[in-house]
Image (spheres, rainbow, N blue to C red):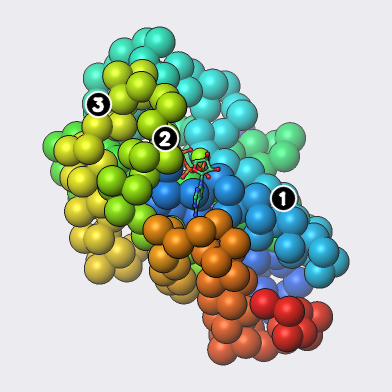
Amino acid sequence: MSSDHGYPRPPLPPLSAGRGLFVVFEGLDGAGTTSQSTLLANWLREHDRDVELTHEPSHGPTGVMLRSVLGRRMTMDVAALALAFAADRLDHLYNDRNGLVGRLASGSWVVCDRYVLSSLAYQASQGLDPDWLVSINQHAIQPDVTVFVDAAPSVCLARIGRRSSDDELFHGHAQLGQVQESYREILRRGMFVGGLITVDGDEPMDIVAKQVRAGLVSWIVQNEPALAATFGPGA
Ligand SMILES: Nc1ncnc2c1ncn2[C@@H]1O[C@H](COP(=O)(O)OP(=O)(O)OP(=O)(O)O)[C@@H](O)[C@H]1O
Ligand SMILES: [Mg+2]
């Protein structure tokens, strides 16, 4: 194996060197992370950003297997499941074909629906040690910005009601409540968060989208003003 495949990988270049911004969306099932990541990616493209919209589990081989487990077509030991999420993440970040780190380095902005915090929140809610979950994700890069779509479990369940709660691994009210608690604890610790933007996921979709855009522009103006030039007052 050549040295550029060794771990730890070299750090990402700084934003000032022209790499893209890495934005991730987190929240409970049904909070609206898929809707909001899509809306943000479209809005950024309207502002001439080259945007890669992606999600975890990824489309890679481990991601395909993970979707079968999440959809209860296969079962897996909870610790093995956590390792599979971490493996899928490394492949998503570093694979030679379209790995996100390469895309970021070449200047694309990446908007990712779920990332490390999903692993920490969902797998901790299954009783796994949070420190172990952090350690198996140690080679994942830190996002620049995390958008947390903060929606109540009852709202999420109403939205995903068409899917039976027996069909997916984490869809009971009690499970979602535990995951929400895990998220709050993890956000307090601040690891793998970067800049945190919390939006009110109980609100209608267009209001949430506006909060996301305003939060991101405000973060950019404060932290990376050189990137702010083309956004204007439209947020
Ligand atoms: N703010 C909102 N108000 C009302 N409905 C919403 C809102 N956000 C999303 N929805 C609807 O709720 C459902 C779930 O939304 P979405 O798929 O974006 O959630 P998600 O967080 O990605 O869920 P999952 O984790 O299960 O993939 C969809 O039918 C979507 O149209
Ligand atoms: Mg989704």
Quarter of the C terminus within the rendering = bottom right
Q: Which residue is mark 3?
A: 78
x 45%, y 33%: residue: 87
Are the residues tagged 1 and 2 within 8 Å (C-beta)? no
Disc nearer the start of the sequence (1/2): 1
Q: Is residue 203 left or right of residue 121?
A: right
Q: Counting other residues with Cα less than 10 Å from the Cα at mark 2, is it few (<14), some (14-19), or many (20 or more)?
A: some
Image coords of residue 181 (percent x, y): 20, 53
Q: Which residue is at 25% across, 60% downward?
A: 184
For badge 1, the amino acid type reads: Glu
Cα separation between marks 1 and 2? 26 Å
Please state which amino acid type lies under the numbered disc 2: Ile
- Image quadrant where one finds the N terminus: top right
Q: Is residue 63 visible?
A: yes
Q: Which is more foreground, mark 3 or mark 2?
A: 2
Callout 2: CB less than 8 Å from ligand 1: yes
- Circle on res. 184: none
Q: Is residue 8 visible?
A: no
Mark in the foreground, 1 or 2: 2
Residue 160, disc: 2
- At a point 60% along the width and 53% down the height, the residue shown is 37
* Label 3 – label 1 distance at C-alpha: 30 Å
Along the viewing direction, whichever of 19 and 59 lies nearer the viewer: 59
Are the two marked residues, 3 and 1, in contact with CB atoms closer than 8 angstroms?
no
Q: Position of residue 66 (x, y in %)?
A: 45, 24
Which residue is under mark 1? 52
Q: Residue at x 21, y 46 (%)?
A: 177
Disc 3 residue type (three-letter): Val
